[in-house]
Image (cartoon, helix red, strand yellow):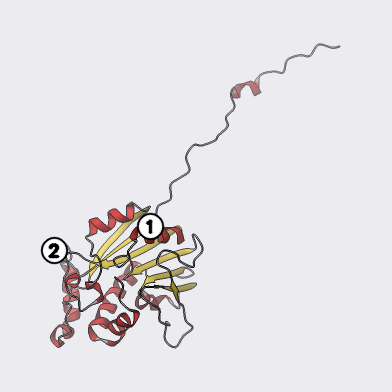
């Protein structure tokens, strides 16, 4: 089930809780990928709140939004880079993406297998993808007041196993959003404290959002040379004398 793009926009840009969630997740993304100079960066789902730091760095930035969700122009006040697309048929050439961020995409998709295949297709050699999903053990997946309360939540093992089955190699994982998913003023004022405490206690405390970075795994060609010399030492043998006619 996809949320409407208007609901996502209102949450992330017009509510204190949404702006706090946007900042917490975006800060983690920037730590994982501090520099994307000259690269092609693509977001799928509703990942545009995380793409803004890369607008001035990347060679190209594209925000893909699935048809069941809808699309909105983004970024405000600048040339539009958002595109409406089918969930499993992206308007991108094969192997042209360097960095892919997927948020509010995988957990809501009715065909996650096809979606991951499409993500694998567009990534180039050495490309990396960042999958951001509701954490099964976190508080945010249990609250329907935020977009992370919809769709299928994942544990780290579940998400990494699914990625491996589609050719990805999980590299790093982390959680964020340790603050409660509440609009109450007290929790909003103490949000930074909760995030800092949660990062320090992350091996023990589960954040509301799970992030897994994965690379594109490409197998080396097998089989070697198809043709071999049957008797390679024959080329070193002296030529037979030819009798004069």
Res. 2 mark: none
Location of the C terminus by quadrant is top right
At horizontal 32% and vertical 56% (from top left) the residue drawn is: 163
Name the residue beneath numbered marker 1. Answer: 215
Residue drawn at 26 percent across, 81 percent down: 18
Which numbered disc, 1 or 2, marks the residue that appears first in the sequence?
A: 2
In the rendered image, is residue 172 in sight? Answer: yes
> Residue 134: where, in percent of width, then height?
24, 68
Q: Quarter of the image containing the N terminus?
A: bottom left
Tag 2 residue: 204
In the shown orientation, is residue 195 left or right of residue 36? left
Residue 38 spot, x, y in % from top left = 49, 69
Check if mark 1's residue and mark 2's residue have beta carbons within 8 Å.
no
Q: Nearer the viewer, residue 91 or 232?
A: 91
x%, y% of residue 239? 72, 18
Q: Quadrant of the rendered structure where residue 2 is?
A: bottom left
Q: Decide which of 80, 190 is in the foreground and name it.
A: 80
């Amino acid at each position: 089930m996809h949320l409407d793009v208007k609901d996502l926009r209102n949450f992330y840009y017009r509510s204190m809780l949404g702006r706090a969630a946007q900042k917490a997740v975006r800060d983690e993304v920037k730590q994982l990928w501090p520099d994307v100079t000259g690269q092609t960066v693509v977001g799928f789902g509703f990942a545009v709140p995380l793409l803004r730091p890369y607008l001035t760095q990347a060679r190209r930035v594209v925000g893909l939004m699935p048809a069941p969700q809808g699309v909105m122009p983004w970024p405000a006040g600048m040339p539009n880079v958002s595109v409406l697309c089918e969930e499993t048929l992206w308007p991108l050439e094969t192997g042209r993406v360097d960095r892919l961020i997927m948020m509010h995409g995988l957990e809501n998709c009715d065909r996650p297998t096809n979606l991951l295949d499409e993500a694998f297709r567009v990534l180039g050699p050495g490309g990396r993808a960042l999958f951001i999903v509701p954490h099964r053990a976190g508080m945010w997946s249990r609250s329907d007041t935020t977009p992370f309360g919809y769709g299928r939540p994942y544990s780290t093992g579940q998400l990494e196993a699914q990625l491996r089955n589609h050719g990805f190699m999980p590299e790093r994982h982390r959680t964020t959003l340790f603050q409660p998913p509440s609009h109450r003023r007290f929790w909003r004022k103490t949000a930074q404290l909760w995030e800092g405490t949660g990062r320090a206690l992350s091996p023990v405390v589960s954040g509301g959002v799970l992030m897994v970075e994965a690379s594109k795994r490409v197998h080396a060609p097998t089989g070697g040379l198809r043709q071999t010399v049957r008797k390679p030492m024959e080329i070193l043998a002296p030529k037979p004398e030819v009798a004069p006619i």
